[in-house]
Image (cartoon, rainbow, N blue to C red):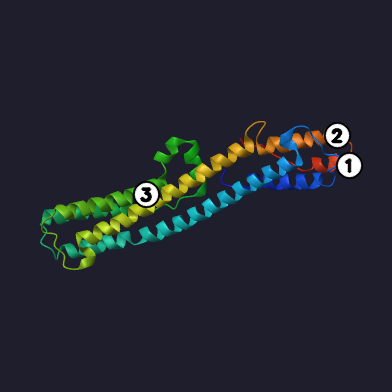
Amino acid sequence: MASETGHYKNVANGLLLIERIETFPSEYKPSKKKITLVELKDYHEKGNNYITEVQQAKGNWSLIVDGRQQGFRGIKKFSTRIMGILSGTNMTKKEIETARAINVKIQGVKLIKPKEVDIEKEANEPEAKKHSASRQSYDSLYENFSDLIELLTICQGYDPVVDEFKIVSLKGYAKGLLDYNSQMAQAEAKITDIREKRNVFMYTPETGYVDVMLDAKSFIKGLFGADSEKFKNINKISFRNIR
């Protein structure tokens, strides 16, 4: 569920229910602790915190997506430039041909920007993570570029004068790409973790946010009657278990 609307609505409606109950505090006196007004307020505060945490995690993920996109954007041109300077080194013809074959692989990778919906799909379906086109595209580009560096490292004739193309610089460039992928994995794991904790809090049978709010509604129905105006006003406030 890429959209957070359903979760947000449940939390927001919890506040509406609390505000309605506060119009008749002297009459609303359940013996069940979980649906007392104090406890309902505590539930709402925690639910609201989860909504905020998920939003923050999603915002951080979006920034990392854009940052990685920018970071990987120049790799194909840079690889082409590396091919261009090979003729100015003392590499053998066969070594240059091998390097160019790797460059063909680099140029052939199409970067696919990840979508938020993929995070939950991968969390619910472990196999989806293995076959994610977006994940594979970035991993493949990094691996191919690393293969190129490894080849150049063992070629004694690869002796560029320009610092940008020296092995130490190329390895630094590759590490930057790996860092982008690591940051992405961490951001995705953060979203998944917070969503799982939120879902447990919101939708655990009997003790979850939604079931507690529904119990409060049922108590009010019994307290004032199904035909009472107080219950009719509260009955309009809906809650939905998203399990």
- Looking at the image, do the residues carrying marks 2 and 3 touch, with CB atoms under 8 Å apart? no
Mark nearer the N terminus (3 vs 1): 3
Q: In this view of the protein, which residue sits in the foreground, 2 or 190?
A: 190
Residue depth check, mark 2 versus mark 3: number of the one nearer the observer? 2
The CA distance from mark 3 to mark 1 is 59 Å
- Looking at the image, do the residues carrying marks 3 and 1 touch, with CB atoms under 8 Å apart? no
Task: Tell me if mark 2 has few (under 14), some (14-19) or many (20+) residues whose alpha carbon lies within 10 angstroms of its own.
Answer: some
Mark nearer the N terminus (2 vs 3): 3
The CA distance from mark 2 to mark 3 is 60 Å
> Where in the figure is residue 37, as x and y percent of width and height?
76, 42
Residue depth check, mark 3 versus mark 1: number of the one nearer the observer? 1
Where residue 71 sits, quadrant-wise, is bottom left
Residue identifier under label 2: 223
Please report the residue visible at 52 percent of the width from the left and 51 percent of the height from the top.
Answer: 57
Residue identifier under label 3: 137
Specify the amino acid type for callout 2: Leu
Residue identifier under label 1: 229
Image quarter in which the N terminus is found:
top right
- Above or below, 211 against 96 in this view is above
Mark nearer the N terminus (2 vs 1): 2
Is residue 101 in view from this perspective?
A: no
Tell me the element at label 3: helix
Q: Left of 107 or right of it: where is 227?
A: right
Residue 108 numbered tag: none
Please report the residue visible at 81 percent of the width from the left and 42 percent of the height from the top.
Answer: 234
Specify the amino acid type for callout 3: Ser
Tell me the element at label 1: helix
In this rendering, the count of numbered labels is 3
The CA distance from mark 2 to mark 1 is 12 Å
